[in-house]
Image (cartoon, rainbow, N blue to C red):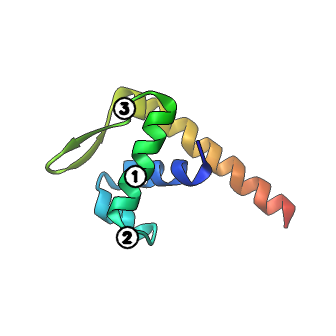
């Protein structure tokens, strides 16, 4: 698991849409999908239900979202302290 995967996960969770998340992350939709798939495989859980209207967090995804946001905030604090 990488911080970039967590950032992608959080962005998709907040936007509930792959294409909008990709635009915010300045990357392609296939790249976002690949990062989510890699994260799900590394954790061994399904994080999203993919629907025609967008992405909906599974119960596992909802639990991970809180921890992922905290991890990204902690990483941001580390970067700020380093500077």
> Residue 60: x and y, percent?
41, 28
Can you tell which quarter of the image residue 61 is in?
top left
Residue indicated by mark 3: 46
Q: Residue at point 56% right, 55% down?
A: 4
Closer to the chain start, of discs 2 and 3, is 2
* Mark 2 residue crowding within 10 angstroms, few (<14) / some (14–19) / many (20+): few
User: Where is residue 73 drawn, in percent x and y?
Assistant: 65, 50
Circle 2 is placed at which residue position?
23
User: Which corner quadrant holds the C terminus?
Assistant: bottom right
**In 3D space, how far apart are the residues under numbered discs 1 and 3 (Cα atoms)?**
14 Å
Other-residue count near label 1 (Cα within 10 Å), few / some / many at <14 / 14–19 / ≥20: few
Residue 5 drawn at (x, y percent): 52, 50
**Left or right: 42, with 2 as reference point:** left
Q: Which is nearer the eye, 39 or 78?
A: 39
Query: Mark 2 or mark 1, which is nearer to you?
Result: 1
- Disc 1 element: helix
Q: Secondary structure at mark 2?
A: helix
Relative horizontal placement of residue 72, taking residue 81 as reference (left or right): left
Q: Quadrant of the N terminus?
A: top right
**Is 45 placed above or below 70 here?**
above
Q: Residue furthest left?
A: 52
CB contact under 8 Å: marks 2 and 3: no
Name the secondary structure under disc 3: loop
Q: Is residue 10 above or below residue 20?
A: above
- Read off the residue under disc 1: 34
Point 45% across, 51% down: residue: 35
Q: CA distance from mark 2 to mark 1?
A: 15 Å
């Amino acid at each position: 698991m990488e911080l970039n995967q967590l950032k992608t996960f959080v962005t998709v969770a907040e936007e509930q849409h792959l294409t909008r998340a990709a635009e915010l992350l300045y990357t392609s939709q296939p790249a976002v999908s690949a990062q989510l798939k890699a994260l799900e495989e590394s954790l061994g859980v399904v994080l999203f239900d993919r629907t025609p209207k967008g992405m909906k967090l599974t119960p596992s995804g909802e639990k991970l979202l809180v921890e992922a946001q905290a991890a990204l905030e902690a990483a941001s604090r580390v970067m700020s302290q380093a500077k």
